[in-house]
Amino acid sequence: MSTCRLKFIQPIEGELFRFYVPSVSQPEFPHTVDLEFYKFNGGCDCPRFHFNCEPLLSRGADKAEHLRCGHIKDARSFFLDEILPKIADKIRHLAKPLPLVIQAQGIVTQIQQADPCQYPDHEKIADLLELKDHILATVDQIRDEIESARDPEKHEDAPSMAGSPEDMRYE
Ligand SMILES: [Zn+2]
């Protein structure tokens, strides 16, 4: 299938696996594809799927290439090319707060293991304040990631996270 057709596929807002896929014969009437239907075989509202594929799938046939119309195939390509890389990106960002959490745990251990006689109150307070900053930064970072995963449009123009001041802050 041509890349040019994929350009006209429209993700349905708020639906990770549903797409409007243009019809070749009537481009103004797109078909609705749901990639999750029939255990991720995918489903479509076009006649070919309805008459040739759906009867077998609804009787329990396993998912298969020949049980997919061109619209489902196009939507699957679109998902792999356009959506999956974005999901992979989000997952990598979500994994990032881990080092922060480990640093915070290090501070807790340090506080717990300190000899009370050698551990003046002002140092203890300084350590606790540092711990508080770590926790607040972690919470902010996780909140940002959740918001951007929920509403990718809002963050689309933001510069790439790699090497941004955001990253440096936690080094
Ligand atoms: Zn179809």
Image (cartoon, rainbow, N blue to C red):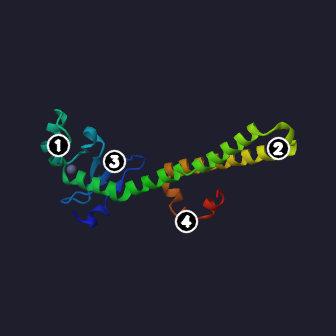
Q: Compare residues 167 and 141 and report the one nearer the observer.
A: 167
Whether label 3 touches label 4, CB < 8 Å: no
Task: Name the residue at 86% across, 38% down.
Answer: 117
Image depth: mark 2 or mark 4 in front = 2
Q: Residue at x 19, y 34 (%)?
A: 58
In this view, the residue in front, 85 or 6, is 85
Q: Label 3: which residue? A: 18
Mark number displayed over residue 158: none
Indicate the quadrant where residue 162 lies: bottom right
Instruction: Place residue 167 in its image quadrant.
Output: bottom right
Q: Residue at x 24, y 60 (%)?
A: 27
SS for dot 3:
strand
Residue at image position (70%, 40%) is 109
Residue mark closest to the camera, 3 vs 4: 4
Using a 10 Å C-alpha cutoff, classify the residue at mark 3 as few (fewer than 14 neighbours), some (14 to 19) or many (20 or more): many
Quarter the C terminus occupies? bottom right
Q: Which residue is mark 4?
A: 159
